[in-house]
Image: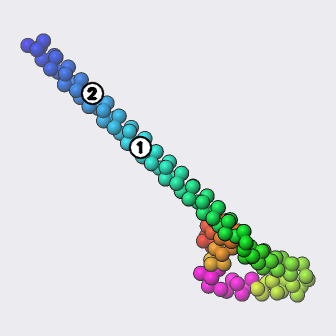
Amino acid sequence: MIQAILPIVGDLAGSWLKGKAEEKAAVAKTRIAKAEAEAEIMKVAATSEASWEKVMAKGSVNSWKDEWLTVLFSIPLILAFCGDWGREIVSNGFAALEAMPDYYQYTLGVIVSASFAVRSATKFFGKR
């Protein structure tokens, strides 16, 4: 009787172990597929960002906006070295900018960031 039951129990145990092994293999395949999908998403995002930077750089080749912003940002720097009257003008100007609405200040930050193709700087302007 025991000799007749042992092969049946052995087959059941073997089937159960085989099922567990297949289940673990399926879980591993799912993890690998998820990791590959996430890697592809990151690759596409990086490629898109690089393409955006390239387009912005090409677009600014014949533009004066970078030079304009450089001159504009140099004015307070130069005035700061022109004695008390220059520093007073700079202080009053920055106080007036500080009184501007937040959306205007953020917009200025975005304009400067976009002009110089510095996308990461927009994160700084958003964390006031």
The tag on residue 17 is 2
Judging depth in this view, the residue of 77 and 111 nearest the camera is: 111
Say left or right for 99 vs 21: right
Secondary structure category for the residue under label 1: helix
Q: Residue furthest right?
A: 83
Instruction: State which quarter of the image contains the N terminus.
Output: top left
Instruction: Specify the quadrant of the image occupied by residue 123.
Output: bottom right
Contact flag, marks 1 and 2 (Cβ < 8 Å) = no
Residue 57: give x, y in percent of width and height: 68, 65
Whole-number angstrom distance, CA of label 1 to CA of label 2: 24 Å
How many C-alpha atoms fall within 10 Å of the one at disc 2: few (<14), some, or many (≥20)?
Answer: few
Residue drawn where x is 64% and y is 74% of the image: 110
Tell whether position 104 is magenta: yes
Amino acid carrying mark 2 in the image: Leu
Instruction: Specify the quadrant of the image occupied by residue 58.
Output: bottom right
Residue drawn where x is 24% and y is 23% of the image: 14
Secondary structure category for the residue under label 2: helix
Span shown in magenta: 94-105
Residue linked to disc 1: 33
Task: Give above or below for 56 relative to 11.
Answer: below
Q: Residue furthest left?
A: 1
Residue drawn where x is 42% and y is 46% of the image: 34
Residue drawn where x is 43% and y is 41% of the image: 32
